[in-house]
Amino acid sequence: SMQRRLNRTLNSSHDHKLLASMDVKGFDPKEVTVMVKDGKVKISAEHEEEHTTTRGKEYSYRKITKEINLPPGVREEEVTYSL
């Protein structure tokens, strides 16, 4: 089964360091976006559902975002993540 926790790890020259962890339970992996830009890691997850009930259609929408500054000395191309 797929682990639904998003882990940010920094891949330095000698070891791996955990930068952040984000719980994305309830989101499909394709609904999670990770961007590394301007010295920051930006994570967002967006989920939309439509249900038909006896009263008509109901919609639910969830979005979570997190932005993390990279520590000094860490290059953007060194950042890795796993889902």
Image: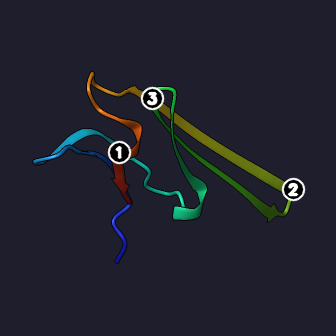
How far separated are the C-alphas under marks 3 and 1? Answer: 10 Å
Q: Earlier in the sequence, mark 2 or mark 3?
A: 3
59 versus 54 height, above or below: above
Type of residue at label 3?
Answer: Lys
User: Residue 74 vs residue 34: left or right?
Assistant: left
Relative image position of residue 26 (x, y in whole percent): 49, 57
Type of residue at label 2?
Answer: Arg
Residue identified by numbered label 3: 40
From this viewpoint, is residue 6 visible? no
Residue identified by numbered label 1: 79
Which residue shows up at 44% across the image and 27% down it? Answer: 39
41 versus 8 height, above or below: above
Look at the numbered discs 3 and 1 and tell me whether their residues touch, using CB distance below 8 Å. no
In the rendered view of the protein, which quadrant contains the C terminus? bottom left
Which residue shows up at 77% across the image and 62% down it? Answer: 51
Relative image position of residue 17 (x, y in whole percent): 17, 42
Residue 7 versus residue 51: which sits nearer the camera?
A: 7
How far separated are the C-alphas under marks 2 and 3? Answer: 44 Å
Residue identified by numbered label 2: 55
Which residue shows up at 87% across the image and 56% down it? Answer: 55
Front disc: 2 or 3: 3
Q: Earlier in the sequence, mark 3 or mark 1?
A: 3
SS under mark 3: strand
Q: Quadrant of residue 19?
A: top left
